Amino acid sequence: MIEMPAIASGEVEIRLLPGMSNRHGLVAGATGTGKTVTLQVMAEALSSIGVPVFAADVKGDLSGISQPGKSSPKLDERVKSLHLGEWKFFGFPVVFWDLFGKQGHPVRATVSEMGPLLLSRILNLNDTQTGVLTLVFKISDDKGLLLLDMKDLQAMLQHVASAAKDYQTQYGNISAASVGAIQRGLVALQQQGGDQFFGEPALNVEDLLQVDGNGHGVVNILAADQLLQSPQLYATFLLWLLSELFEKLPEVGDPEKPKLVFFFDEAHLLFNDLPAVLQSRIEQVVRLIRSKGVGVFFVTQNPIDVPEIVLGQLGNRVQHALRAFSPRDQKAVKSAAQTFRSNPKLNVEEIITQLGVGEALVSFLDEKGIPGVVERAMIFPPHSQIGPITPEQRAETIRTSVIAGVYEAASDRESAYEKLKGKVAASPAARPNPLPEVNGAPGSPPVQQSSATTGTDWLQQTETMLGTVLGSGTGRSGRGDSVVQAMAKSAARSIGSTVGRQIVRGVLGSILGSSRR
């Protein structure tokens, strides 16, 4: 049985069981109570047993996990009070990511993968506008026009608006006002830097599941300090990433340890003004993703920020201090106290408001999946650096990363924009084969697919074909994919036809709301 390093100490040392880490959890507490350090200590413990971690760094402080820590009066006092003896300092393997490509490797997704439902949330569209956007995606699917980046979507919107009467009989009314609202939303998103996120090569989620040569899980850190200025983009991106993991990873049941633990910081942003249809799908993903070996920890100031149906699935709890200055705060304190398995020695509702910095009420699942009795505990200090690293240290970590060079250069292959605007590259050898229309113009025969080119087999064959056509590139330590191969896989994911011959997209971005498999 794998034993994880202790995370906190109460009457006894408290450990998160590896086999229960995919049962999800909650880290809550008011600002300044120690949530970030708790997240860092948990990430260290998971990494030390070979579990990769993904976490958003909303303040820049979490980057210190890449460097060995240093002695300080406060840290030395904590070590002494917990009787930890000689405390060792060391860093952990880290990969930095950044949607804007400035503080980490660029993270991209295609517009098609994002899908109309998630994209409408980023653009803050109403129901009517969302319906029109869904029709635009449907038409692009039927016409075999790939939506890879924002200029593809803008070109498609212009095309649909100009030909609205032609499409009206088959697809219904397409309001020019709604198209205009979507276009204005895209312009605003571009000004926020969101256009850098849409494109290729798209993120391969397997790059988040790496383990270094020492058997330590890689800690993937998303630079989110600037991203939080666009909270809708931040929350929707993390939601998209969660859905991608759910879609791409195979079922593993109850593994000895998780494949990945995902920390969703500032979780309240995810549930703010969330449409009911999207919330129901989030609940579904949270409920089912543990069978893929993925644990999700929501990090937020107040437990009531998380819907009750989701909160009920979070078996591992770390509750830092809450303040009770208002009726809402008092409700949160009472609600948090009631979610713990009671301890006759503790008045939990009273203690929550008295906890010091770095102190928490902790309850983890036992080996049978039953919540442990709540304990008042002190969180262990991290072995790595507390606080941010220097720009030079970050740059060196990025330069020496195992995926350095894979995502840095954006690609722009033939897609909806080029086909609609007639700006295909001049060299025929440099172009991919033109796509046939899928469910094309009225009267045209439907495109037939053989059973050998559908589903997973088709996807694997397409990846192999594109990899051969584009070239194999050079290998990298720890992974076989080169820049070209990453592009090939991204292309394969986008071109594919599965259910209903639609361009594939994740379960949360699907037009029909169904899995792509």
Image: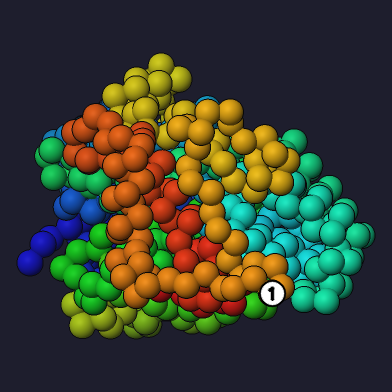
Find residue 241 and report its horizontal and vertical position in percent.
Answer: 47, 56
Q: Is residue 339 visible?
A: no
Is residue 144 depicted above or below 276 in this figure? above
Tally of marks: 1
At x 12%, y 60%, the residue is 3
**Outermost residue toward the top in this view:** 392
> Mark 1 — residue?
443
Is residue 239 depicted above or below 340 in this figure? above
At x 71%, y 46%, the residue is 420
Nearer the observer, 476 or 276? 476
Answer with the quarter of the image where residue 341 lies.
bottom left
Image quadrant containing the N terminus: bottom left
**What colouring method underlies this structural image?**
rainbow
Find residue 350 and report its horizontal and vertical position in percent.
Answer: 51, 71
Find residue 83 and report its horizontal and vertical position in percent.
Answer: 18, 47
Answer with the quarter of the image where residue 178 lies.
bottom right
Answer with the quarter of the image where residue 122 lies.
bottom right
